[in-house]
Amino acid sequence: ISSLPAETGWVVDHLYQYQGFWHTSRELQGVLACQKHFQAQDSDILLVTTPKAGTTWLKAITFAIVNRLRYVDNPCNHPLLTNNPHELVPFIELKLYVDNQVPDLTTLTSPRLFATHLPFVSLPASVKDSSSACKLVYLCRNPKDIFVSLWHFTNKLRPEEKGTNSLEETFDKFCRGVSLYGPFWDHILGYWKASMEKPDRVFFLKYEELKEQPSLRLKMLAEFLGCPFSPAEEANGLVDDILKLCSFDNLSNLEVNRNGKMSSGEGYNTFFRRGVVGDWMNYLTPEMVGRLDQIIEQKLHGFGLKF
Ligand code: A3P
């Protein structure tokens, strides 16, 4: 484990590199605890993202797909109307195994739904194990939009007296791979390769695809998870209902997401900003775009990944 002063770049004072990826000290403790204690079950579903790839959206959608039969006759009681998606689908390393906790997860009803930002290489052995049948859903997003979203997010979390992060410095770090759970290219590649090797276990999805073809991608996701929509469900408009329930406009305007807070005190509203594709155009200079394009080209295009 090596450490790096984060200077003005992030919310924290230091980042630590472990297995090739950067973490805050608190995250890292969680990563190590997960590796030691998390025991995957075959019916588990693990949602994986880098921060700002659309985790909140993926959590909402997957929760709604998996639990749809329980609320189809009583949509007004849907948990997503009164709970932030992060409460319903906890991060293993950021919520369950933080602060030296070793929770008993064996009593949770199946399928257990968890999330993580862990890079593939750092997943607990029981998840990666070739005999395990648990399913991973990886959502990635155009790195330019991830960067802009992350920059806004870290600004919101910084104490006011520290002012705004420098866009240029933060960008430089991002391009050098120094960001939460970065380098982003290695994070994406780990899961891309895994999805090629084991398509029945790793479903690779892009935020942009979900925006462009929401019903198609939702149905593909349900199919991958082993709970495809029946023709009757489709005819009854269940796919559209879920998309509406989980839409940016709907979720971001719910009372819980406007005014609710995490146990750490940050508002749930920090997870909702614009929710669009291509906002990077409003922030990045042509030089920045050129630099990031070159990285994406060098690191990802050869593997068939384009944004
Ligand atoms: P922007 O900052 O570009 O608006 P994460 O959930 O991984 O932290 O990612 C947050 C990003 O996803 C933010 O992007 C946020 O606005 C967007 N987002 C949150 N909920 C969404 C939803 N229901 N649909 C689409 N985008 C959503």
Image (cartoon, rainbow, N blue to C red):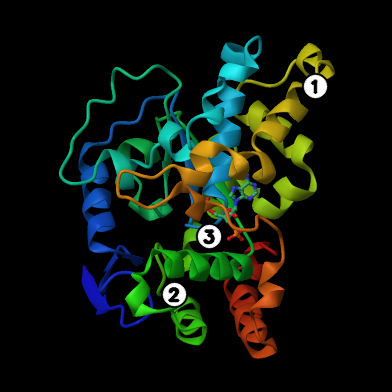
Q: Decide if ligand 1 comes within 8 Å of the CB at mark 2.
A: no
Cα gap from disc 2 to disc 3, whole angstroms: 13 Å
From the viewer's perspective, is residue 77 above or below residue 222? above
Q: Amino acid at mark 2?
A: Gly
Q: Amino acid at mark 1?
A: Gly
Above or below 292: residue 216: above
Q: How many marks?
A: 3
Q: Residue at x 34, y 30 (%)?
A: 40
- Judging by the rendered image, the residue that carries numbered circle 1 is 237
Instruction: State the mark number for residue 189.
Output: 3
Q: Does residue 272 sit above or below 83 in this rendering?
A: below
Q: Residue furthest top?
A: 73
Secondary structure type for disc 3:
helix
Local crowd size for mark 3, using a 10 Å CA cut-off: few (<14), some (14–19), many (≥20): some
Q: Earlier in the sequence, mark 1 or mark 3?
A: 3
Residue 270 is situated, as x and y percent measured from the top left of the image, at: 49, 55
Q: Secondary structure at mark 2?
A: loop
The residue labelled by disc 2 is 177
Mark 2 against mark 3, which lies toward the viewer?
Answer: 2
Residue at the right extreme? 235
**Which residue occupies 42% across, 50% down?**
267
Q: Percent position (x, y) of residue 157?
A: 39, 64
> Would you say 255 lies left or right of 1 here?
right
Q: Earlier in the sequence, mark 2 or mark 1?
A: 2
| Residue 258: x %, y % from top left | 52, 45
| Left or right for 23, reference 194 | left
Label 2, label 1: how many angstroms apart (C-alpha)? 43 Å
Q: Is residue 157 visible?
A: yes
Mark 2 or mark 3, earlier in chain: 2
Quarter of the figure that contains the C terminus: bottom right
The residue positioned 65% from the left and 13% from the top of the image is: 72
